[in-house]
Image (cartoon, rainbow, N blue to C red):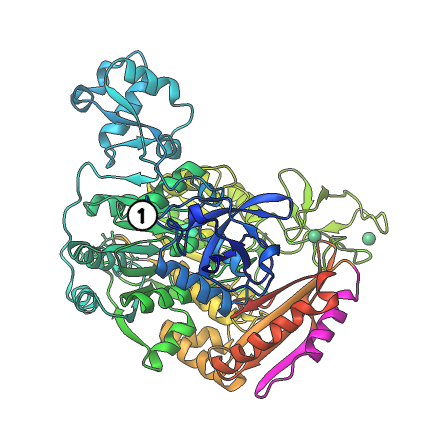
Amino acid sequence: MTSPLIAKVAVPVPLYGLFDYLVPPELIDGIKKGCRVKVPFGRKQIVGMVMSLGSESEFALAKLKSIIENLDDSSQKGPALSEDVLKLLEWAATYYQHPLGEVIFSALPKYMRQGELAELKAEKTWRLSESGEQADAGMLKRSAKQAALLTYLQQSPLAEHSAAQINEDWENWRAAIKALVDKQLLIMEEKPLNALISARHSAAEIQLNSQQAIAADAVIASLGEYKTFLLQGITGSGKTEVYLSIIEKALAQNTQVLVLVPEISLTPQLTQRFVARLDVEIASLHSGLNDTQRHSAWVKASQGIARVVIGTRSALFTPLPQLGLIIIDEEHDASFKQQEGFRYHARDLALVRAKNKNIPVLLGSATPSFESLENVSRGQYELIKLTQRGARNAKPPKVSLLDVCKRPMEDGISDRLLDKVAEHINKQGQVLLFLNRRGYAPLLMCHECGWTTACTRCDANMTLHHHNQMLRCHHCGYEKPAPKVCPECQHESLYIPGAGTERIENALREKFPDVVISRIDRDTTRRKGELDKKLKEAREGKAQILIGTQMLAKGHDFPNLTLVGILDVDQGLFSADFRGTEHMAQLVVQVSGRAGRGEKPGEVILQTHHPEHPLLHTLLETGYSGFAEHALKERREAFFPPFSYMAILRCESTHKDQGKEFLKECRQAFNYKEVDAFGPLPAPMERRAGRYRWQLIVMAKERKLLHGALRDWMPRVIKLKSASKVRWSIDVDPQDMF
Ligand code: ADP
Ligand code: ZN
Ligand code: ZN
């Protein structure tokens, strides 16, 4: 008698290890690694994934349960996840010390996780009929909305529109669209379009300048082999043009291309630029999609129908049978690192995927991460530079420091900067004021007794929001009305130190009542589509003064922008995090890069209380590369990454000492040569949302040493009795220390 077939199955639960199930005889033929299976788990039935098949189990056969159903019978469709994606995920689970089941299932879109078939789902789409193409919108006199929609569709670069795409630009459009269908100007079809777009007219080919051509040729010559390129190009140097030209070549070789971008820069504008240039189906995968769209985009990519995938972080795990090139734009961006659950870095994993597949990776940025620059020095990456702006003879902006010590400074903006704003506006320029702090003011304070608006659940102050007179904690979301008198001493001497974007906006509205001002931060862009709408208005020059946070730092092209003011550059100079200065420099350079992209020259002003600070001078005098070289030297001396390798074991608990005690036990179990442990230390914000937070930092000079230690240590940590009583997580290669 042959021994029964046993499947090791990954299930989406926060438990390490796989689960053994018997494969019933009738399922043996169709089952393979990567197939989703329905299995009994506890009292429920859940969807798991087969990770291996064999004849051994450490449990008695009689105790094993059987697989109920194979959801991806390989005689029909084949496994849900391809061999290379599975390999990547298995590697990542080990590297980041995260339960494999959760890792595997985080790579699947929702309907796949729920066990639905890997098939396309139909959705309503609209396209112009022949008469619609030619119709003159003027004839729809009686309905302005219908006329406007018709013009919009005629001018759109897209051949077909889904509801989601129309939603990006219109509100309450359904009745008008239906009327256009009734008039036979539009054709409505139900088909699997979703998130996938095809072009109607293609954009004119752009002639690459010589630097761009050299960059593109280097990568093109490496198609078909594993190699990592770092494209360091100043803002506006045409990195996107270089990507497009390489992608065209990769597509001509019949491969698929994966492009990862930070969430915030994945605007319709960017996708449309790709759509207009590339004559293939493009899938875009981002958080704005509904589950149906995501499912179809994923299925099209994994069946090789979509040839280019543009997506955020998690799109890295999309199966792409003919993947031939990975591009990561804004590779320095912190959003490539997932900060919760499975804490992976999409850029780092992209390299692993590329190596397994033997294909090139192109990392692009105006301000590369220090890790990547160090990898260039070590000969791991090839550096390609673009030093000139691509188009319109645009010149780099003039950057200067503005000492605001002892200067009149109402509401966070100095009189000198206000004069500059007026000057640029009078010359019909556009102004961007950058401050990485939303709300009206970071706190409220009593002049009399020193009372401040501390959050009762966090070690932090609550931010004042002026428009609704509320105090809100940006760390736990707790909200309460702002008091009129001091709750401690009852004096009416509350004052408002510091400024956030809301305060800047109010101040400028008073100073410039006739100018259109647009504030772009998380508070003003909560509604879906609002950010894209505001960005569009900014691009078109409708808003003359833009006030923004982080959101405005990246990848947006405002052709008319002539003045950028960074209101509080000091924020980054005195950060508790060893990456603080790196982020400060990236921000200054990225925000500055917004100025003077068009015909008019740009000017950048940095408000500071520390005009003599050597870091600011290094940045201004030697530029980003010089700054990075200098700062990397300091990192090397302090043994911080990339000159060491780090992991943080974090713990939080409602009881004050429980987390600390747990980490103490973890530390006792940590005993490895040449790997150091520090802590338990309180987190920089010790209490957050009512929980006490502690951390244990482990570091080694070599990656191998750190990972050897983690592999031995983590199973011991998991087995500790106290481990089940607190919330804890391990963060390998942490991007921030909080
Ligand atoms: P980056 O991605 O580096 O910020 P982009 O690719 O967006 O730069 O280019 C900035 C602008 O310059 C775009 O409008 C682009 O079309 C234009 N551009 C770039 N390279 C060229 C070129 N060789 N010829 C004409 N226009 C170019
Ligand atoms: Zn008081
Ligand atoms: Zn709070």
Q: Is residue 248 above or below residue 606?
A: above
Question: Helix, strand or loop at disc 1?
Answer: helix
In the displayed structure image, the side of residue 212 where residue 494 appears, left or right? right
Q: Position of residue 483 (x, y in %)?
A: 76, 43
Q: x%, y% of residue 58?
A: 58, 65
* Residue at the front extreme, as displayed: 1
With respect to residue 157, does 697 lie above or below? below
Q: Which residues are magenta?
A: 655-680
Say whether residue 113 is magenta.
no
Q: 499 or 38: nearer the eye?
A: 38
- Seen as rendered, the residue at the extreme right is 489
Quadrant of res 364: bottom left
The part of the image, by quadrant, that contains residue 382 is: bottom left
Where is residue 33? Give x, y as percent.
Answer: 41, 56
- What residue sits 31% from the left and 54% below the top? 320
Residue situated furthest bottom in the rendering = 673
| Residue 170 visible in the snapshot | yes
Q: Identify the residue at image location x=47%, y=70%.
A: 582
**Numbered disc total:** 1
Name the residue carrying label 1.
301
Q: Residues within 10 Å of mark 1 (few under 14, many from 20)?
A: many
Judge whether residue 290 can be spotted in this image.
Answer: no
Q: Is residue 676 magenta?
A: yes
Which kind of residue does numbered mark 1 sit on? Ala
* Quadrant of image for the C terminus: bottom right
Residue at image position (72%, 60%) is 459
The quarter holding residue 340 reads bottom right
- Residue 205, position in %: x, y? 14, 50
Q: Is residue 86 above or below residue 737?
A: above
